[in-house]
Image: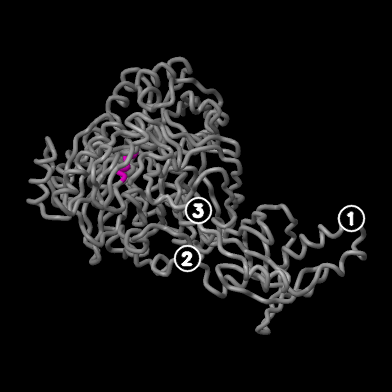
Amino acid sequence: MFEKILIANRGEIACRVIKTARKMGIKTVAVYSDADRHALHVRMADEAIHIGPPPANQSYIVIDRIMEAIKASGAQAVHPGYGFLSENRLFAEALEAAGVAFIGPPASAIEAMGDKITSKKLAAEAGVSTVPGYMGLIGDADEAVKISREIGYPVMIKASAGGGGKGMRIAWTDEETREGFQASRAEAANSFGDDRIFIEKFVTQPRHIEIQVLADKHGNTLYLGERECSIQRRNQKVIEEAPSPFLDAATRKAMGEQACALARAVGYTSAGTVEFIVDGSRNFYFLEMNTRLQVEHPVTELITGIDLVEQMIRVAAGEKLSFGQADVKLNGWAMESRLYAEDPYRNFLPSIGRLTRYRPPAESAHEAAVVRNDTGVYEGGEISMYYDPMIAKLCTWAPTRDQAIDEMRTALDAFEVEGIGHNLPFLSAVMDHPRFCSGEITTAFIAEEYPDGFAGVSLPREELRRVAAAAAAMFRVAEIRRARISGTMDNHERKVGSDWVVVAQGERFALTIDADRQGSTVRFAEGDAHRVTSDWTPGNPLAVLHIDGVPLVLKVGKSPNGYRIRHRGAEMKVAVFTPRQAELAALMPEKLPPDTSKFLLCPMPGLIVSVDVEEGQEVQEGQALCVVEAMKMQNILRAERKGIVASIKAGPGASLAVDDVIMEFE
């Protein structure tokens, strides 16, 4: 077994590999760019080596820099994580030439499967069903349009060397094909150094289901069940689960056997994933094979009990798999929510900055439930504009799907993140969505259920009443504490009344509180009463209460006359008034936000790539105005209505913050 391995990656996956290596008694070497000098993976590793400036193409994907670090550290093997050099044939070959083990598949398998065009041809030859498409190289946008017409719209434009949703677009028209081809090619070049593009038929109402395979160097190839990855946004997975709520045993077996056949056909070893599109009749079509560890691998680990990173290391060291296909059992259900640094209220655009508060729910594992959080950040750390916006992967396990979802709801409610925009509210909203809960999902779920973007959540009235009862009880505790400051409790207790009015989400709840040493009984005007107990103290940003014995987890911030409360995807101001204050508050005028309709504002921190209009030019609704790049993604900003460009405030190359003015209209 290896004594020391180098992890050619960063963030949560580097931390994940370090944890398993430490468990196996293997020392680890981290690499880092200038931006990651104080990163968590650097802190966790036994040693760390600097490899260059922040941009990945000057550090993490420069093979020579990694090879120098390997030589300096004396590492015997390299785990590439995912992304960066994980599917780079030249990197695997360089390691082999240097006598260093690659904790991944052979270079030949990477070459065969890492290229999506080649992999589809090989899959077809191996008898795996594939999606119709054009696998040849496409020279320009005109050729892309011609091919798309022949295949038939809608089509999927994809980067041949792509992954993680980069360089992918769906096109329904010739115009969308032209724009999509140019944008995909630019993203592919920036992310992978390879701008080759191919086009295939887009299967409508599809599910994205993938099979985890594992193979050693002794001819053993297994599949470890499937993962449902249909909850996607812009072709980027957001929520994954294992197993799939859609597959039956026969389909699972057929997909697993085809995945193994493909792996054997290319001489694959190590962990890998074969991705399929599955239609409503459970027909499945090969998409691609990822010759690396997947982001969502924890859900497979949770239902099989198999540490995939450990198996990868053992296979790379030449060991034989210690179990066979018959030994692989699927136990319970696992969920994974990807926490991203992106603002769901701004169409999920990237957010960067300092994590002023970062408190994940406590990890735990017992027979009834598991909470796991794979992360690469810490409180006070920076979210950089140079890398992927993922902050953490929150996972839960339970015996059934409903229980796993319920565990995830509670864990999301308890996850505290401040300082940046993040998608926790959206993740919570999905967990409560009836369609998701039923398992009737497709890759179009987000587009269909949130066609106008995410505008937040309005809690059902019954849940809102629970929050109102909790807020009133907490407010009363805070009022009593304030009353104690200048005297004894006996002198001031009488000044804190029992009658209150709670206002939340536009609804008013008149209620009375009867308190004792064990908690409070909150009685609504309608007559129903609820028992509220908690050890919450004023100022604590996380409140864990019980309403009639049922847990309620709230993230709490102080606001005038109440709290800013976040719960189950809802963010709201909850005001707590005395009856007289409530009468007066109802008379106050509503403050309106400023009018910004004449400005194009930068929706995210980013770099202006191009400005496609001129001052004085008339623009039409939907016309492209400029392109902003952030976190390796190019975003086209379009005119919301017809108008004339009065002035342009920022040109190509300008680095802008959120809400900086790009241009003004007459």
Q: Residue at x 81, y 57 (%)?
A: 482
Q: Residue at x 26, y 44 (%)?
A: 624
Give whichever of 468, 31 is nearer the camera.
468
Tell me which amino acid carries mark 3: Leu
Task: In the rendered structure, find residue 424 and report the number of the disc placed on it.
Answer: 3
Q: Give the x, y percent position of residue 459.
A: 52, 68
Q: Regarding mark 2 in the picture, which secondary structure is present there? A: helix
Of pointers 1 and 2, the one earlier in the residue sequence: 2
Looking at the picture, does residue 584 appear above or below residue 54?
Answer: below
Give whichever of 131, 358 is nearer the camera.
358
Of pointers 1 and 3, the one earlier in the residue sequence: 3
Looking at the picture, does residue 15 appear above or below residue 523?
Answer: above
Residue underneath mark 2: 432
Give whichever of 181, 585 is nearer the camera.
585
- In the rendered structure, the answer to whether residue 573 lies left or right of residue 664 reads right
What secondary structure prevails in the magenta region? strand
Q: Which residues are magenta?
A: 633-637
Tell me which amino acid carries mark 1: Ser
* Mark 1 and mark 2: Cα distance apart in space: 45 Å
Badge 2: few (under 14), some or many (20 or more) residues near its Cα, within 10 Å? Answer: some
